[in-house]
Amino acid sequence: MFNAIIKYIYSGVISLKNYEASAIFDLLITINEFMLPELVSHFQHILINNNTTWLRLNFSRVYQISFQNENLIDLQKFCNDVIVKHPRMIFDSDDFINLQENALIALLKNDDLQMDESEIWDKVILWGKAKTPNLPPKIGEWNHDNFKSLKSTLQNCLSHIRYFQVSGEDVLKKIKPYRYILEDYIWDDIISKLIAPNMPITSPILPPRKKVMVQVSPRKVSIIKPSSSIITLQHAAEISSWIDQRSTYYDTAEIPYQFNLLLRGSRDGFTGEAFHRLCDNILGTVVVVKVNGTNEILGGYNPSIWKADNWMFGETTGSFIFSLKKINLFLVV
């Protein structure tokens, strides 16, 4: 990377031939440190336009790093556009509590975030408690200083919660236990709005988030193209959840990936030559096979690419194999 940057400084030319998406992303971070704004913008466009799959597969890392660097505006926008439609990619991830404050605030400001306000409140509290040391595990054991510490941690986030879009039941169940982190006038206005909704209040009323209508009927356009004789939409949701290393499965209406058929054994043959001819140099491939005479489906996922002309083994931490019989077995290899 250093040699590539030195060459660019002296010649004005930088070649990305044979660079995989991960290397381009790492190079982008280095270029940003060298303060080369024209390349920073160009590399972001290359990743967004040509390497969307890799960005999704490594979403948590990309999201965290993009918000640690104020120059990566295009990547920040790309990430926020994804999260607005699929918020659980980040809110339900194990890395959520490590989110940068500015990244969380960017999400809270978004009018199109597809989550209920009470869920957003829960996540903000979860994030704040993780960032605030020495809080007792049970809120009943908290003292004034504990609430004061949490309020300090969340001081830049609380103003972006749409309190008046939370149901009365959730106000009492979820917000009331933490009312001491709110300004007195905000808590008074929340209660006043519930009791006398037509009475004026002093707190600003943020607009409700715009909800996209989700069809509960089967998809008109399948995400598995063409339709598979082996895996179902539910299988695709499970596999997508494993790819994103989620602790819970995606709903079938939330699947963030498109499954495009590259090879079908009954049509293209089962030879290694056919496999490499049709599947080489494509990031993010899923292989599924149905065991003859049984209902068992076996498969594997490769986040990197296959190469027929390179017999050296590659390394990845994101690959896995699976079984889709009656009990889902998941193994990272």
Image (tube, rainbow, N blue to C red):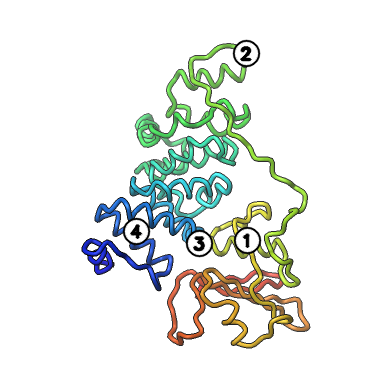
Q: Residues within 10 Å of mark 1 (few under 14, many from 20)?
A: few
Disc on the earlier residue, 1 or 2: 2
Q: Amino acid at mark 1?
A: Gln
Disc on the earlier residue, 4 or 1: 4
Disc on the earlier residue, 2 or 4: 4
Q: Amino acid at mark 3?
A: Leu
Q: CA distance from mark 2 to mark 4?
A: 53 Å
Q: Nearer the viewer, residue 27 or 145?
A: 27
Q: Outermost residue, top direction? A: 199
Determine whether label 1 and label 2 are within 8 Å by CB.
no
Question: Could you say whether the residue bearing mark 2 is in a helix, strand or loop?
Answer: loop
Q: Residues within 10 Å of mark 4 (few under 14, many from 20)?
A: many
Q: Nearer the viewer, residue 100 or 83?
A: 83
Q: Position of residue 302 (x, y in %)?
A: 53, 73
Left or right of 28, for residue 312: right
Determine whether label 4 and label 1 are within 8 Å by CB.
no
Question: Could you say whether the residue bearing mark 4 is in a helix, strand or loop?
Answer: helix
Determine whether label 4 and label 3 are within 8 Å by CB.
no
Determine which residue is flagged by label 2: 198
Q: CA distance from mark 1 to mark 2?
A: 47 Å
